[in-house]
């Protein structure tokens, strides 16, 4: 195994471990859920992606040719924003119904009214708009 | 050199899982706990992959892939249950 591969794998491993730690530190220390979402969805995903690419490089250089790790990397990079969006929607829904109030967001009593005919999330149908001409 | 980096990465991810466990237990809201579980699964994938590098084998790749899929589906199912009170409508 060449020295260049070894240096690259070492760099990717240190980067991956550092970013995974920073993401979880953000999850543990930031004040409210909407800020806590940033750490795991960005930093931790990048850290795990670095570890996976390091694994693919190292095992390929050691003789066992493998590109499987890129599959997990792709899957994680696709699913992390979707999971974060679902968690944010669940949080917004709970706050709109005055469940789970979060004082760190300055929302001790749930979200204020939206001012429109519908509420904050998911239990209301979309507002009754006048039927457009294209809809039959 | 790679061994030292591996030990560093193991230590970082282990501390990260401990921090996730703190957030999972401390809450305060249900969405926080879901987020902590999701992050913990992603860190578990990292641990499995690092162990695969340590053992110089591709044997643990399938376990990591399965954990990624099941973790994502579990997170979406938890959120769906909070949003609608049901998972499959």
Image: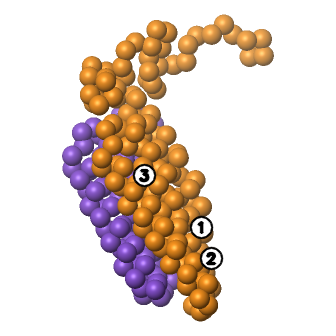
Chain colours: A orange, B purple
- Give the labeled residue for mark 3: A40
The answer to whether marks 1 and 3 sit on the same chain is: yes
Q: Toward the viewer: B41 or A19?
A: A19
Residue placed at 24% from the left, 39% from the top?
A: B28
Q: CB of mark 1 within 8 Å of CB of mark 2?
A: yes
- Count of marks, rendered view: 3
Q: Secondary structure at mark 1?
A: helix
What is the x, y in percent for residue B32? 32, 43
Q: Quadrant of the C terminus of chain A?
A: top right
| Label 1, label 3: how far apart the Cα atoms are | 20 Å
Does A119 appear above or below A48? Answer: above
Q: CB of mark 1 within 8 Å of CB of mark 3?
A: no
The answer to whether marks 1 and 2 sit on the same chain is: yes
Q: Quadrant of the N terminus of chain A?
A: bottom right
Q: Horizontally, is A135 left or right of A86 in the view?
A: right
The local crowd at label 3, few if under 14, some if 14 to 19, many if 20 or more residues have their Cα within 10 Å, is: many
What is the number of the mark on residue A67? 2
């Amino acid at each position: 195994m060449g020295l260049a591969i070894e240096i690259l794998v070492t760099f990717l491993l240190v980067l991956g471990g550092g970013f995974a730690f920073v993401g979880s530190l953000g999850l543990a220390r930031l004040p409210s859920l909407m800020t806590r979402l940033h750490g795991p969805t960005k930093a931790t995903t990048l850290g795990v992606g670095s570890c996976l690419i390091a694994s693919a490089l190292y095992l390929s250089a050691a003789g066992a040719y493998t590109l499987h790790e890129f599959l997990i990397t792709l899957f994680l990079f696709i699913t992390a924003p979707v999971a974060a969006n679902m968690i944010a929607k669940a949080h917004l829904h709970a706050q709109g119904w005055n469940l789970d109030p979060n004082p760190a967001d300055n929302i001790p009593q749930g979200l204020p009214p939206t001012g429109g005919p519908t509420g904050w999330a998911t239990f209301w149908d979309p507002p009754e708009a006048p039927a457009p001409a294209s809809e039959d | 050199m790679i061994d030292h980096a591996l030990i560093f990465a193991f230590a970082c991810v282990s501390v990260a899982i401990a921090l996730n466990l703190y957030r999972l237990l401390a809450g305060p809201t249900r969405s926080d706990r879901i987020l902590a579980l999701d992050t913990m699964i992603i860190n578990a994938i990292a641990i499995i992959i690092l162990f695969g590098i340590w053992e110089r084998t591709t044997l643990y790749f399938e376990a990591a892939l399965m954990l990624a899929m099941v973790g994502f589906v579990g997170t979406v199912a938890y959120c769906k249950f909070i949003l609608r009170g049901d998972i499959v409508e």
